[in-house]
Image (tube, rainbow, N blue to C red):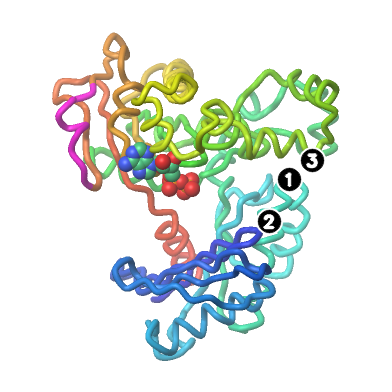
Amino acid sequence: MNVLVINAGSSSLKYQLLNVETHTLLAKGICERVGSDEAFHKHGLDENEVVIDAKMADHDEAMALVLESLTSGPTKAIDSLDEIDAVGHRIVQGGKYFPRSVVIDDDVVAKIDELAELAPLHNKAALMGIHACRKHMPGIPMVAVFDTSFFQTLSPRAYMYPLPYELYEKYGIRKYGAHGTSHRYISERAAAVLDEPLEDLKLITCHLGNGCSMSAIDHGIAVDTSMGLTPLDGLMMGTRCGAVDPAVVPFLMEHENLSTAEVNDLMNKKSGLLGISGISNDLRSVKDASEQGHERAQLAYDMYSYSVKKYIGQYIAVMGGVDAIVLTAGVGENCEKMRRMIFSGLQPLGIVLDEERNRLRGGERVISTDDSPVSILVVPTNEEYMIARDTFELVHQ
Ligand code: ADP
């Protein structure tokens, strides 16, 4: 069964075509800067990637281009759209309505729209993707897979904020989390690598990319996570500040004369590694500068690892221990120095990194010592596969 996975952002449309039964990636690509004069379309598997300048006024036109490139010309991966059996859409905010993935119907579309208040850019973009697919592939079953579903198992003491309760009732203000599909995937894979049932394990999962989040997964159930009402909360990230004293917000608005949009922009786009280092949101550049003695880059690097370390401590306390810590995404998978810093000093907690294994590259792997009571694993994430698998399972019911 071939599933087209769509991840629509406000000005982008990412896609992958996968055969779920054979685990084969048939095609992938991205339309970027949709709606601007500089729009372009990258299509193809790594070595055969082509970049096409293309006019795309909106997601509808981007979708038409994607389907054309999947079925014709040098980028062709399938003979006709009939070979696409279902479409899986990544949706950022599923609120309280969606504790699991669902087949998309009019009611689901209405609820995704209603939830857009909690994730304005993301849910609206996803809806554009859904409408475009409905138009270009009428009748093909579609499934929505939500970033928040995995965290619907959190208990109220973990997801409530100590604000007046009425605000929760009125607006649904609470922790929803994000990156859930990634945390779900790496927790399943970690159990497979350790050859133990997920239901027997206490896991801390760390998605460390441009966006960063961690979660505590107790016997297969997510019990806490670092992102909140929005993906701004929790860890320090590439351009997002993560958790800061909430009083900073009114202070900045007053002293810097900022509007709500401006303060939102400052915390989402100008903070994190970029804000502290003044150099980049990209950890590689920050690392290079810090190694050349750039003090603010060193500080940014240090703060990033400290932020992860603190959550490890929190989640060990929350679960009363941990069996394995799992790392994924750009930084988690690739940056041996960051991993060394995160785990330095944690030996008294039974967490012992193997220096040699930490240096090696590769796919799924254990990087703790053989006698470390807590295992440390690197697991490359694969959210698209998870979306395709959910789609397959729901459509096949
Ligand atoms: P996104 O959240 O945008 O999907 P990624 O998972 O691709 O992000 O992660 C991007 C981050 O990973 C960047 O900060 C980048 O610098 C970092 N990264 C990628 N490769 C390396 C590496 N070899 N060493 C250090 N950092 C890396």
Q: Indicate the position of residue 263 as horizontal and vertical percent values.
A: 76, 33
Q: Which mark is residue 123?
A: 2
The answer for how far apart the CA atoms under marks 2 and 3 are is 18 Å
Residue placed at 28% from the left, 35% from the top? 377
Could you tell me the amino acid type at mark 1? Leu
Instruction: Say which of 211 and 119 sits in front.
Output: 211
* Mark 2 secondary-structure assignment: helix
Kind of residue indicated by mark 2: Asn
Q: Quadrant of the N terminus?
A: bottom left
- Whether label 3 lies within 8 Å of ligand 1 gets the answer no
Instruction: Residue 3: give x, y in percent of width and height.
Output: 45, 72
Dot label at residue 261: 3
Which secondary structure lies at badge 1? loop
Up the image or down, 341 lies above or below 113; here it is: above
| Circle 1 or circle 3, nearest the eye | 3
Residue corresponding to mark 1: 118
Distance, label 1 to label 3, CA atoms, is 15 Å
On the image, the x and y values in percent for residue 386 come to 43, 57
Q: Residues within 10 Å of mark 3 (few under 14, many from 20)?
A: few
Local secondary structure at mark 3:
helix
Q: Amino acid at mark 3?
A: Ala
Query: Which region of the structure is painted magenta?
Result: 353-362
